[in-house]
Amino acid sequence: MPRNVPELLQVMNDMVVLEKALAELYLACSEKFPEDSKFWLAICHQEELHAKFIGELAALVSSHPQEFKFGRPFNTMAITTIMSNVKNSMDQVRNGQFDRKRALLMARDIENSVLEAKYHEIVSTDNIEFTKTINRIMRDTASHKSLLAAKVASNQG
C-alpha cells in the first residue's frame, strides 16, 4: 500500500508492465480475429501510450516528490490479480480457446477491472502535467469500456 514515494513508484512501474501486457493481449486478439483487427489494434496502441504516459508520470513523481500527497492506501495485489488474468487470457486467445464473442467479453471485463481510474484516489497533486495525463488515461479507459460494451452488444446472437 503506497504511503511513500518508493512504494508509489513500484505501483506505477507495475502499472506500466500491466499496460504493456494489455497491449500484447489486444495485439494477439487482432491476429486471432482479423475481422476486428483495426478495433483491437487501436486499443492496443492506446495501451502502449498509457504505459509510456505512466512511465513519464513516475519520473515526474520521482523528480518532484514534494508536489504529491498520498491518499487512499492501495492494494498492490489487485495489479497482480489483473496481470494473472491478462496472461491467462492471452494464452487462451493464442491457443484458440476464445471465440470472437468470448474475446470481447474478456476484454470488457479486464477493462472494467483496470485500476488507472484510481490514481486520483491514490495521489493528489496540483501538478498540471500529472493531472492532465491522468485525465487523458481515464478518458481513454472510459472510451475502451464504451467501445467494448458496444462491440459486445453488436455481437450478441
Image (tube, rainbow, N blue to C red):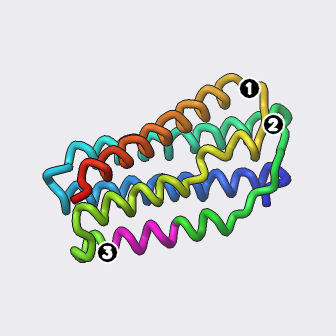
Amino acid type of the residue that numbered disc 3 sits on in the rendered structure? Gln
Q: Residue visible at 50% across and 46% down?
A: 51
Q: What x and y, as percent, mark residue 27?
A: 29, 55
In the picture, the quarter occupied by the C terminus is: bottom left
Badge 2, how many Cα within 10 Å: few under 14, some, many 20+? some
Q: Quadrant of residue 89?
A: bottom left
Check disc 3 and report the residue beneath it. Answer: 92
Secondary structure that dominates the magenta span: helix
Q: Is residue 139 magenta?
A: no
The vertical placement of 114 against 89, above or below, is above
Find the magenta span and give its range. Answer: 83-91
Q: Residue visible at 24% across and 53% down?
A: 155
Whole-Å distance between the Cαs marked 3 and 1?
Answer: 41 Å
Q: Earlier in the sequence, mark 1 or mark 2?
A: 2
Q: Nearer the viewer, mark 3 or mark 1?
A: 3
Check disc 1 and report the residue beneath it. Answer: 127
Q: Residue visible at 61% across and 54% down?
A: 13
Check disc 2 and report the residue beneath it. Answer: 68
Q: Earlier in the sequence, mark 3 or mark 2?
A: 2
Q: Quadrant of residue 125?
A: top right
From the viewer's perspective, tell me whether residue 22 is left or right of residue 30: right
Tell me the element at label 1: loop
Badge 3, how many Cα within 10 Å: few under 14, some, many 20+? some
Amino acid type of the residue that numbered disc 1 sits on in the rendered structure? Asn
From the viewer's perspective, tell me whether residue 55 is left or right of residue 8: left
Q: Nearer the viewer, mark 3 or mark 2?
A: 3
